[in-house]
Amino acid sequence: MDTSYSSALPHLQHASGSEVTGKGKNMPTNPVRKTLVKLVVGAAGMFLFALFVMPPLYDVFCDITGIGGKTGGAYQVSEAGVDTSRTVKVQFIATNNGAMPWEFTPKVYEVTVHPGEPTEVAFYAKNRTSRAMVAQAIPNVTPFGAAEYFHKTECFCFNQQPLDAGSDADLPLVFIVDRDLPTAINTITLSYTLFDVTDRIDESVAQLN
Amino acid sequence: MAHGPAKGIGRWLFTTNHKDIGTLYLWFSFAMFLLGGSFAMIIRAELFEPGMQIIRPEFFNQMTTMHGLVMVFGAIMPAFVGLANWMIPMMIGAPDMALPRMNNLSFWILPFAFALMASTLFMEGGAPNFGWTFYAPLSTTYAPPTVNYFIFAVHIMGASSIMGSINIIATVLNMRAPGMTLMKMPMFVWTWLITAFLLIAVMPVLAGAVTMMLMDINFGTSFFDAAGGGDPVLFQHVFWFFGHPEVYIIILPAFGVISHIIPTFSRKPLFGYSSMVYATASIAFLSFIVWAHHMFLVGMPIGGELYFMYATMLIAIPTAAKVFNWISTMFRGSMTFETPMLFAIAFVILFTIGGFTGVMVAIAPADVQYHDSYFVVAHFHYVMVAGAVFSGTAAVYYWLPKWCGRMYDESMAKMQFWISFVGFNVTFFPQHFLGLAGMPRRYADYALQFSDWNMVSSIGAFTYGASQLLFLFIVIRTIRSGTPVSEPKVWEGAEGLEWTLPTPVPYHTFSTPPEVK
């Protein structure tokens, strides 16, 4: 069955640029084997690249550019100083993901703030079902260019939110619009999508947002 | 080495002969072509009239998904791997592929992959129904339970493609006849060498994408799930990082085939050989940096849209270079119009139409209208069917007499060409109109104003489908009772090492390497 393989080997002596010294089938100098090893390593490398490099790279890329409207984690207030010469309108949207049955709504739909001024608002959530559930809110800022200038010092989205059957809660949010917000942006829309994560056992989620 | 083919089924199961494996690939791909084609017939039958006529919408979704998957991974890709197996060793003067036993393995895992995938049609929950692009979360959170079979099937066919590519690269780089430098290689070998590198670069990325899906579905990770900190848009980026090179993986070997047929029947050498090589390499390189033009509507900053738009339009330059080279090859040649040439000329014309609509959908602001409409369906069928499938058909007509020493029936083949050509255009040209008028793709039903063109399109599809059965008949008839041909050059204008071999090609060829001047 292997005739074609062994008959291929003497042929290799004539192949351009290759020097075959032995005739053994498993000789390490076999140029085909060298090519094979290089290509297998390349393919394995691309697989690992897709699994372990592309997702983190995407996150870093989105972080830097604000693409996707993802906001950062808890913000440490640095130097105070409110830019009273400017006002920015901040709008709030609450959406339920899929079949999430909770009532979820912002308590105020719109505030006008000065850049650099900490502002507290709240969202309202009520578990309308007859079982205890856990939710996770995922934020998104539009326009994307505003994402890196929208800081949250306190947010319900940093943690998962458990609610007993029929109970409700006010969910606090404290944010600061950065003084460096580009002057072209006068309105920022902050949207939360509420996901049902009752079935997930994923504590690391909190740090991601 | 007078070692003939083994007897019985064992010949095919255990073969390490590149011609046997090429034959297996070609028959397998044709079987898959008919399977995927029958799914398309079901789709077009349902869309013949508005309203739900024959099947349920859930099943329609399974049909669109399976049609795409089977055609891309089961029909077109293996067909060109089959042609590569048959032709590359003969074109470069090698006795066989460099890794014959791996060659056997890479073929024989394919039927298992597609058996797994097709078996989902009979399972509870039905076959995959999320489109051949399997966007998360449709393919994760909302997928039928059979998605795990789909993932496993994709892994197997990916492994098969990677092994096939490794084999081709190892063969081309190490087994060329003395004197055959890289820049003397036939175009088909060049396009396949470049395609094989593309495959090795992106098939593992596809494997990575389905692995992440598998973990999201079964092991509680959140690569693509926003609730757990992931991002469904990441899936689209990973998928199209594979997916855009994938469409060139499909079309580049087709370019190679056409670059052989047109010179043969124009009786002139290929115009601009080296520019063809560089154009192919440029297209391959560009394919890695344009993927997000499939995702203009996910919400991208304007800079991103502009970059992906211009980068995509850049691809038109090397592609146009190829088209002009083919036309220049024909210019002032002593052309004859045998069936392979008819398919090749149709390829050049129709692929160019598909290329132009490609430039149209590449324009980010205009794509807002075209996106996910039948215009896109028309566009990619012009490049996939009139591109890859026409070229594959041309290749079979062109090389079949060489392979089996029998000539096909020219008038029957010409009839098959014209039925295909007319059927294809009647099917897909109206879909441009439907798309521009606002008909979205992948829906089981449509608004009444789309009725007429859908009926025309369905009639065209049945015609085109029938022409493929005629093709099957012609091929079988040629093999069994075609007129014998014995001159090494089956076509008088053909050039290359493969045409120095006896006709029909013996089981073992180039046991001693030929000298290339």
Image: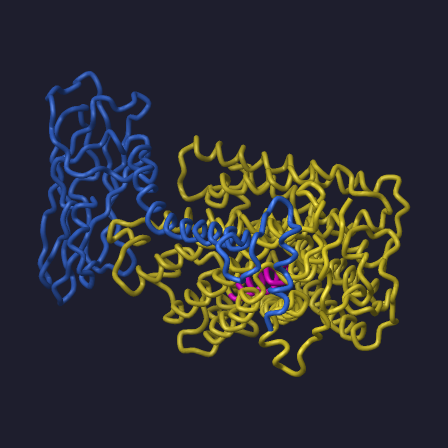
Chain colours: A blue, B yellow
- B103 and B251: which is toward the camera: B103
Question: Is B301 one of the magenta-colored residues?
Answer: no
Q: Is residue B163 left or right of residue B390?
A: left
Q: Position of residue B512 (x, y in %)?
A: 72, 59
Residue under the point 77% across and 61% down: B399
Magenta region: B66-80
Residue under the point 23% across and 40% down: A92
Q: Quadrant of residue A68?
A: top left
Q: Position of residue A35 (x, y in %)?
A: 52, 51
Magenta-highlighted stretch: main secondary structure?
helix
- B413 and B94: which is toward the camera: B94
Quick check: can you spot residue B49? no
Image quadrant for the N terminus of chain A? bottom right
Q: Is residue B274 left or right of residue B99?
A: right
The correct choice, above or below, for B28 with respect to B259 in the image is below
- B499 and B111: which is toward the camera: B499
The correct choice, above or below, for A109 with respect to A112 in the image is below
Quick check: can you spot residue B15? yes
